[in-house]
Amino acid sequence: MQFHLDFEKPLVDLEQKIRDLREFSTEKVDFAGDILKLEKKAAKLREEIFSKLTRWQRTQLARHMNRPFTLDYVEYIFTDWFEVHGDRNFRDDPALVCGFARLDGEPCAVIGHQKGRDTKEKVYRNFGMPNPEGYRKALRVMQMAEQFGLPIFTFVDTPGAFPGIGAEERGQAEAIARNLREMAALTVPVIVTVTGEGGSGGALAIAVGNRVMMMEYSVYSVISPEGCAAILWNDGTMGPQASEALKLTANDIKELGCVIDDVIPEPLGGAHNNPREAAANIKEYLKKHLKELKALSGEELIEQRYQKFRAMSRVKE
């Protein structure tokens, strides 16, 4: 399904002209020269657009419906994927996919949020907002991974945990809190990648890792820009202003020096323009950090994780 953001449209129109010229080119009428000029113009325009994105535009990119989701990265990065369903208590939660796979032949556990693209899939996946059973399923897989000494890779892409009445009745807050406690005590390497939208506790519940990374056009914050605007100004349409105040982009958070460890570069124009290249970049960083963490013992992994998250604060007198 084709979908384009407002600031992408000038580039999309130019690329359409290039496709039209290629289609109309024949042996008698050759538009090669015109195509070459337009391609150079398109490359320059793409660089100009994506070098000057506002925080709100980056937020829109992080939410792009064509952006790769967890199962896309599973396909491109891992092999022998086996998905686990259900929390053995209530039901399965399609908003959070969990299972086991291999990274270059090495067994591992993979956990990540899964959004939908069309209306039917969005409803099925609950827009990537997990219920408590989803977090219990994730914890079940983490504990199995620890039992067999497998590294854990998590992929964060959610606006937040589902705030429905049913979710609260089934223990949403307790499920998130338990995940945070249990992840902090895992004796295996945990590597977190924010691939799209990292929202509030819904993201943090699978993001307590020894290494935390963000993709170049992803965002990570305690609340969505619209939610922040609704609280501060009683006007959810002021999301663009709130995003500037939140400083939620990968570059902003990297500057803090204590929240994330790496920013993973994306193809120019975003991961949705070249999912395979984006996945290859992620895989390179996963392998690099896993190699470093494998040198640590279980106790050292717990201590490193503890010290990492204890350092995420600054006190000004």
Image (tube, rainbow, N blue to C red):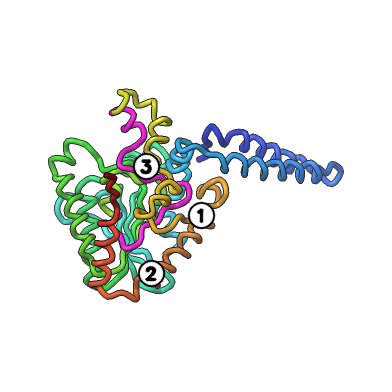
Q: CA distance from mark 3 to mark 1?
A: 28 Å
Q: CA distance from mark 3 to mark 2?
A: 33 Å
Task: Please give the count of numbered marks on the rendered protein.
Answer: 3
Q: Which residue is mark 3?
A: 121
Residue 15 position, x and y percent, is 66, 40
Mark nearer the viewer, 3 or 2? 2
Is 169 on the left-hand or right-hand side of 94?
Answer: left
Query: Of residues 95 and 180, which is closer to you in this image?
Result: 180
- Residue 175: in sight, yes or no? yes
Give the amino acid type for the residue marked by disc 1 in the picture: Pro
Q: Which residue is mark 1?
A: 265
Residue 156 position, x and y percent, is 35, 51
- Residue 158: in sight, yes or no? no
232, above or below 48, in the image? above
Give the amino acid type for the residue marked by disc 3 in the picture: Glu
Q: Residue 214 magenta-drawn?
A: yes
Labelled disc at residue 290: 2
Rendering quarter of residue 17: top right
Rendering quarter of residue 38: top right
Query: CB under 8 Å between callouts 1 and 2?
Result: no
Mark nearer the viewer, 3 or 1? 1
Q: Residue at x 62, y 44 (%)?
A: 47
Q: Residue at x 38, y 69 (%)?
A: 290
Residue 268 position, x and y percent, is 57, 49
Q: Residue at x 67, y 43 (%)?
A: 44
How crowded is the residue under tag 1: few (<14 C-alpha within 10 Å), some, or many (20+)? Answer: some
- Decide which of tag 3 and tag 2 comes sooner along the chain: 3
Magenta residues, as a range? 207-231
Query: CB under 8 Å between callouts 3 and 2?
Result: no
Residue 22 position, x and y percent, is 74, 43
44, above or below 76, in the image? above
- Decide which of tag 3 and tag 1 comes sooner along the chain: 3
